[in-house]
Structure formats: structure tokens, C-alpha cells
Image (tube, rainbow, N blue to C red):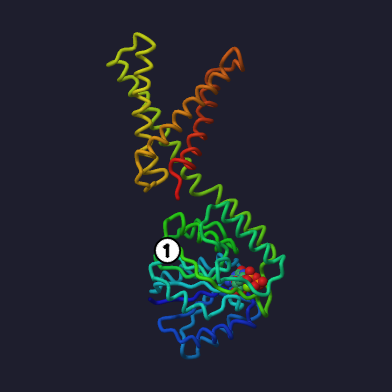
Amino acid sequence: MKTLIIIPTYNEQENIANLIESLRNLKISNLEILVVDDSSPDGTGDIVTHESKKPGLAIHLLTQTTKGGLGKAYANGFQWAIKHDYTHVISMDADFSHDPKYVPEMLKVDENVGIVIGSRYIKGGGIVGWDTKRYLNSYGANIVTRIALGLKPKDVTAGYKRYTREFLESIDYKHIIASGYAFQVEMIYEAQNYGFSIVEIPIIFADRRVGQSKISGELKRSAKVVWKLTKKREGVRQFIKFCIVGAINTIVDWAFYAIFKTFIGSSTQTLKQIAKACSFVIAATSSYIMNRKWTFRSTDNQILKQAIKFIAISVGGLVINNSVFYLITSPKFLHLADILGLISGTAIATFWNFFGNRKWTFKED
Ligand SMILES: Nc1nc2c(ncn2[C@@H]2O[C@H](COP(=O)(O)OP(=O)(O)OP(=O)(O)O)[C@@H](O)[C@H]2O)c(=O)[nH]1
Ligand SMILES: [Mg+2]
């Protein structure tokens, strides 16, 4: 294991030297520090340069020309770490809220765990020094975020974390949405979606003792990021894939219907219905396989159960499609053009099928 502790700073001249000193005193081998400073006007960068000349702990400084936010600082720090030969990265605030004493505990966790969270909201963890309002704000934001994004860890807004190089390399930094504090949430979201393991260890988080807070305005910005995360990305990508699969299998359905009609015959309505049912089963099966493998990348091995659920939802979709078509085109109801019935029926049934399958058939447990 070779670990890099990344500390983003903006105007932390009262904290940074003491923090570096505390980390040096841990006397951990194979540990280095990277401070990502956004050209702090208070001279934080100069202090870091001064500290880097002392023996005992390798200290690097990455200076950014403008204040770009916590997320941007981490994204650049992570990419710096990838370019060098570290196996793990620990992210840490400069203001002693993240007690250096937890570094050895984080390093003790199995080295293959994708993310180790220094968690305030599990047994043994906690926060000291915050008033009720700040606590409720943080706790509330954490709960809402967990529900909105379906995140499993208890503390998803935590900033004190350990990452493996493998996870950091898997991130597409150009497409990270958050530049501010929500970056922390986005990392957990990425890790969970891509199947990296996440472990929480309890920490007591202490309020900043000295220096200036930069949190104001972040809550609103973070809420926007969480909103974008729920709407965009995985869900949208899945929906597009689902529609492509649907289009392909509509053609499969027509083609097989034409084939079955020539074999079974189409002289009576019953024969036509049989041909239609056969082609539906084939199209639904092929659609199931494509959605399982490609759209939802499901690894659940109860294939029969899943396929039955998929077909049940498809039948529901068919009923919805036909009912909407009937409502829109029938002289008894809206009596509009067939094409409108076709489009509305297909659109509504597609939503039904997508959300039904996402929530029920291919749900992750
Ligand atoms: N490089 C960089 N670091 C930042 C920026 N904003 C905040 N930081 C650093 O990120 C860490 C966390 O910021 P804090 O201001 O402590 O935020 P907080 O912990 O949520 O709030 P308080 O502790 O109450 O101030 C600190 O080390 C900051 O110096 C930024 O825009 N750029
Ligand atoms: Mg802080």
C-alpha cells in the first residue's frame, strides 16, 4: 500500500501547518501528502512549501489559479494521484474536523475495499460542536440524498474517505457534475452504481476550531447536483437503451407475425390471434434478454422468475397500449386520428414497461 492524503485548502493558514505536523507525527511509512490549494490569498500555499522542506513526510503542493470549489480540487487531486504510483488516496479537510488519528484505522481496512467512509452516522460515530440547526441541516440533507439516489451507506456526504486507485481510475472526470461539496455524494453514487465495495468506520467529527467556513450557499448548490444525478446519467441512459431494445423488438414482432401468418394461416381471426401471440412471446423473450444483459446489466440468477415478471409487465403494457389506442380513436370517446392513438399508446406503455421493469423485474437488492 502506498497512500496519498489529499487536503483541499482555501485560506487555511491557521490550520495547515498544524495538520501537517500531526500527520507527520503519525510516522506512517508509505504515506505522502498532497495539498490542493486554490491560490489562497492568505498564503496557505507558502506555508505548505515551507513545510515540504522538513524531513519525515513527503509533501506535494498542487496550486490552482482560481477558487474552483471543493469538488474540482478533489477531481484534480485524484488525477494527480493516478499519474503517480499511489495505491490508495485519503481525502481530508484541513480544519481538523477530520481527526488524523483515524488515518491508521482507515489504512487497516482491507485494501481491496473501494471506498472506506469515515462515518458520522453509524454506531460509534458522531459530531461535536455543531448546534442543532447545523446538525439537522446536515443530517436532513444526508437522509434526503440517500433516498433520492438510493444510496446504501449511512453517511453519504462525508468528506473523510479512503479510495482505491482502481476506483479513482474508473471515474470519467469530464462528466462529473459537482464542482462543490456534492462531489462527495457523487463519488458514493459512482462507486455504488459501478459495484465497488463500500465500508463505513465510525468517526467523531469535530467542528472547525479556527479559520473561515466556506459552506454557505453550498446546500442549495448541492441539492441541484443531487437533483441532476437522479434525473440524468444511469436512469436516462437506461431509458434510451430500453427504447432502442423496444424498437428492435417491435420489428422482430412484425417480422415473426408475418412469418407465422404464412405458416399458421390467416384466414380466421383466431389464426391471426395465434400468430400474434406467438410473435409476441418471441419478441418479449428477445427483449427480456437484451434488457437483462444490456439495459439493466442484471446479474440476478433467478432468470425464470425475472422472465415471468418481464412478460407480465409486457402484457400489462400491451393492455395499456390497446386501451389508450381505443380511448383516443374510438367514436365513443375522443375519436381522434389513429396515428395519435398509436403514438400515445406506445409512449404511455413504454413508460409503464420501463418503470415497471426497473422497479420490479431488474431491481437491485
Ligand atoms: N481547494 C479548495 N479547497 C476548498 C474550497 N472550498 C473549501 N475548501 C476546503 O475544503 C475543506 C472543507 O471546507 P470547510 O470550509 O471546512 O467546509 P465545512 O467543513 O463543510 O464547513 P466548516 O468546517 O464549518 O467551515 C477545507 O479544507 C477547505 O479549506 C475550494 O473552493 N477550493
Ligand atoms: Mg470544515
Considering only vertical position in the picture, is 339 above or below 106?
A: above
Residue under the image location 53 percent in, 48 percent down? 232
140, above or below 349, in the image: below
Q: Which residue position holds label 1? A: 167
Q: Nearer the viewer, residue 64 or 326?
A: 326
Q: Secondary structure at mark 1?
A: helix
Q: Residue at x 44, y 28 (%)?
A: 315
Q: Is residue 103 visible?
A: yes
Q: Type of residue at label 1?
A: Phe
- The x, y position of residue 103, in whole percent, is 49, 78
Q: Quadrant of the N terminus?
A: bottom left
Image height of 197 relative to 8, above or below: above
User: Is residue 65 visible in the rendered structure shown here?
Assistant: no
Classify residue 79 as left or right of residue 145: left
Q: Quadrant of residue 214?
A: bottom right
Q: Is residue 223 left or right of residue 245?
A: right
Q: Quadrant of residue 70?
A: bottom right
Q: Quadrant of residue 128?
A: bottom right
Which residue sits furthest bottom?
Answer: 55
Asked whether mark 1 and ligand 1 are closer than 8 Å, the reply comes as: no
358, 245: nearer the viewer: 358
Q: Position of residue 349 (x, y in %)?
A: 50, 30
Q: At 55% from the left edge and 71% from the top edge, which residue is drawn?
A: 124
Horizontal arrangement in the rendering, residue 90 relative to residue 204 (left or right) = left
